[in-house]
Amino acid sequence: MASSYNFFGVLGEPMEKSSLLLAISKLAAAGEQAGFTLEQMIGLLDAGLEVNTLLELICWRLNGIALPPAPRTSSSHWVV
């Protein structure tokens, strides 16, 4: 039986190492097809970008589908 690591899937179940490696390699391949380098993707994730947002950016670049606008927050603080 393959050993599992402390990585968790969507439903909180441990992911097998082979499943995790496959998911990462698919993400890397899609990102490169979309024009990102591995270093750029790692940098974005290190800077706090969530994986699902990276996936949306990759899809947008590959398919030209516009992302929904980010919600705007209003502030009652005025700079004078």
Image (cartoon, rainbow, N blue to C red):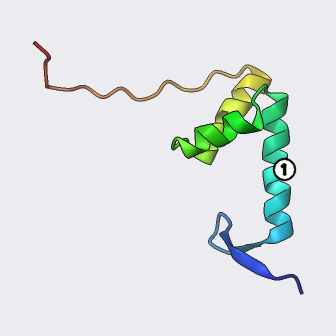
Residue at image position (66%, 31%) is 57
- Residue density around tag 1, few if under 14, some if 14–19, many if 20 or more, within 10 Å: few
| Residue drawn at x 86%, y 67% as measured from the top left | 18
Q: Position of residue 27 (x, y in %)?
A: 78, 45
What is the x, y in percent for residue 58?
A: 72, 32
The residue lying at 30 percent from left, 28 percent from top is 73
User: In the orientation shown, which residue stands out farthest toward the bottom?
Assistant: 1
Q: Position of residue 26 (x, y in %)?
A: 84, 47
- Badge 1 marks a residue whose secondary structure is helix
Name the quadrant containing residue 32. Answer: top right
- Residue 55 visible from this viewpoint: no
The kind of residue tagged 1 is Ser
* Extreme residue in the right direction: 1
Up-down relation of residue 56 to residue 61 (above or below): below
Q: How many marks?
A: 1
Q: Quadrant of residue 40?
A: top right
